[in-house]
Amino acid sequence: MMTQMSAALVWFAGLIGWYIIRYPFARRAKKIRVSKSLFDWRESSILAVALLGLLVIPAAYALIGFPARLDRPFIPAVAWLGLAPLCAALWLFRRSHVDLGRNWSISLEIREQHALVKTGVYRFIRHPMYTSFFLLGLAQMLLLSNWLADASGLIGAGVFYALRVRREESLMLECFGNDYRRYMGHTKQLIPWIY
């Protein structure tokens, strides 16, 4: 039986899974020299908005019930549906990290001996991590029963994507030129064969 408490625990388990996936890659990334970085106040602000929407606001709701006046009725069947996008988000998040390997970074950075990755999930979409964030936001919306906590994940992921993807693609074009332009020509940004 899915209860409001168990749905919140599933959401927390998803966040713990997200951290477990990211941690070894973040540690490894610190050991590889960066040749170009676009980490600045703008990048920091964009990351903060994503963190606010996908972690801070829903955690405040799950832990202390704030803001209770924006609660919506809890529907167990809807919460059960949240498991699918949560599992898909975690799988895609891990797969994109594995496929990027030593080329991964938390920010917009080019590593020494950086390679353009076009294999694995990157054969189909250029930005699978953004897709995983949207899936995580969708799972959050289905698992938690509060209008603010529900919306904040998709809004955080949307702002993150909207304000960052052009800059990221410009960096890739600058570094990989026509190779990246050709890659853009036969892949979609977020959803294979669609968008």
Image (cartoon, rainbow, N blue to C red):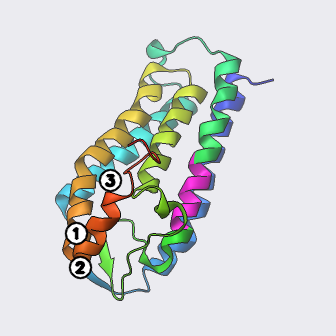
Report whether 15 appears left or right of 117.
right
Query: Helix or strand or loop: what does disc 3 sit on?
Result: helix
Sequence-first disc among 1 and 2: 2
Question: Residue 48: x, y in percent?
Answer: 32, 50
Mark 1 or mark 3, whichever is nearer to me: 1
Query: Helix or strand or loop: what does disc 2 sit on?
Result: strand
Residue 108 appears in view: no
Query: Helix or strand or loop: what does disc 1 sit on?
Result: helix
How many residues crowd mark 2 within 10 Å: few (<14), some (14–19), many (20+)? few
Amino acid type at mark 2? Lys
Above or below, 161 relative to 59 = below
Above or below, 44 relative to 6 = below
Mark 2 or mark 3, whichever is nearer to me: 2
Question: Where is mark 1, residue-wise?
Answer: 173
Amino acid type at mark 1? Leu
Above or below, 135 relative to 126 = above
How many residues crowd mark 3 within 10 Å: few (<14), some (14–19), many (20+)? some
Q: Which residues are magenta?
A: 89-97
Q: Quadrant of the C terminus?
A: top left
Question: Where is mark 2, residue-wise?
Answer: 36
Residue that sits furthest to the right in the current view: 1
Question: Residue 149: x, y in percent?
Answer: 46, 28
Q: Residue at x 23, y 79 (%)?
A: 36
